[in-house]
Image (tube, rainbow, N blue to C red):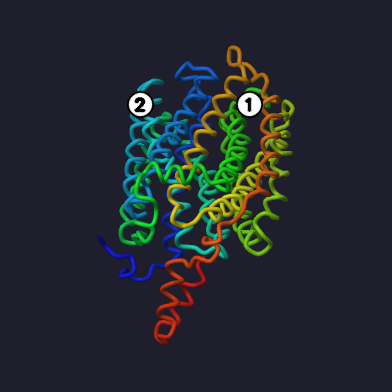
Amino acid sequence: MENEAESPPHNERLILLILTTVQFITILDFMIVMPLGPQLMRELSIGPADFGLIVSSYTLAAGAAGLVASAVIDHFARRTSFMVLYAGFLIGTLLCGLAPNYATLLIARLITGAFGGILGGLSMAVIGDVFPDSRRGRATSSLMTGFALASVAGVPLGLVIGTNFGWQMSFIALSVVGIPPLLLAPYAMPLLNSHIGKSPGHPLRSMVNVFFHANHLRAFCLIIALTMSSFMVFPYLSAYLVSNVGMSEQQLPLIYIVGGLLTLIAAPIVGRLADQRGKLRVFRIIAPASALLLLVITHVPVGQLVLAVVVFGCLMVCNVGRMIPAMAMITSSVEPRYRGAFLSANSSIQHITGGLGAYCGGLIVTQVDHGPLENFGLVGWIATTAALAAVWLAGRLRPAESTVVARSPVEELVRQRSQNPEYAEAVADVGQGM
């Protein structure tokens, strides 16, 4: 097996670029379904509950796959797992574009979710292995810019493609665009196999250590509250803005562009503040604001298009902003030897909760003959309650001692070669991280 210690030094920025690009592709694959909601419901002749199942099928499959991955993923090198999962995700996305009807689209979304859902947790495991806690907030914020980029460029472009060439073409184009990172990964990403052999040998023991640790359970509760507050609302916002507020389908890209641009600007700032001022403190400022905005966006009056755009943009900023310190805290709450299993399980729980949230929202929201959505305000109140609960839960999370003191692979190479004068300049550049 290739030994990581013998590998040449890898620039943290290049690793982060690959992860951010893949994050952009996977998030766009998931996000594009939501603004296509009105078109999918019309062309497939389905209602809100059926559309909610399209959204939740991805997340439920991701959750089930994440549970399996949590038992075995720490037995493989991060790079190997990353490439296999990403290749499977691209195949699933292509199958979505080839789906001729509702049933086959559901099956394709299950396949895509089974592979793509684990990628988020695995990417955070790579972040945890490469970046120390002092730079983890900024690294996480860079990863989160994938969400903003998907909103600014990906979703509007996907909507234009879907509107002019059919919703299937959006997925086909996405599967093609996602190929370059797969080809680059084996040359740019380190193997990251130092964790192999340090976790319990039997998969069931790994799961027990992950799911029965008190601090892990607190982290899981936090991610459940955060995810539930988002996924009960966001899958139905496009339909709500069209049917209730009066926005046209052609105007929908505007809200994603505005929200994405604001997030693209705000995410790096939030990441730096989280590292400098404290992750919990920053979370406690942003999370209550997101709770208030969830309540406002679900009660926008008819015809208030400007208000809808502004509130939606601020909500996207706050949702991403609260996830940056939250995920940094969650990543630091687990020892490195359990990080892959824990973050796979965390991703699994996040996707299962998202699927259940989307489906439950679809059961509460009703629509008659393509008229206005009913009971969306009630969904907003439930989501707001969950968002406020996350503020309390975050305060109960504790960092793992070994996570705080662990060196990143790049820093270890810096330490070993620090006495080489010719290497000093390169070390300084790498050590800056981002």
Q: Nearer the viewer, residue 186 or 65?
A: 65
Residue 400 in which image quadrant: bottom right
Q: Which residue does the image show at 32% across and 38% down from the upper left?
A: 91
Is label 1 in a helix, a strand or a loop? Answer: helix
Residue identified by numbered label 1: 240
Of the residues under marks 2 and 1, which one precedes in the sequence? 2
Q: Position of residue 266 (x, y in %)?
A: 63, 54
Q: Position of residue 297 (x, y in %)?
A: 69, 33
Q: Which residue does the image show at 38% across and 51% down from the upper left?
A: 200
Residue identified by numbered label 2: 99
**Which amino acid type is marked by label 1?**
Tyr
Q: In this view, does 175 lie above or below 304?
A: below
Q: How far is the residue under mark 2 from the one under mark 1? A: 26 Å
Q: Nearer the viewer, residue 169 or 349?
A: 349
Total of numbered circles in the picture?
2
Residue 137 in which image quadrant: bottom right
Q: In this view, does 53 lie above or below 353?
A: above
Q: Nearer the viewer, residue 190 or 17?
A: 190
Is label 2 in a helix, a strand or a loop? Answer: loop
Q: Which residue lies furthest to the top in this view?
A: 369
Q: In this view, does 169 lie above or below 193?
A: above
Can I make out residue 251 in this image? no
Residue 277 in which image quadrant: bottom right
Q: Which residue does the image show at 40% across and 44% down from the upper left?
A: 205
Name the side, left or right, on which 196 lies relative to 318: left
Q: Position of residue 201 (x, y in %)?
A: 35, 49
Can I make out residue 80 in this image? yes
Q: Is residue 150 above or below residue 362?
A: below
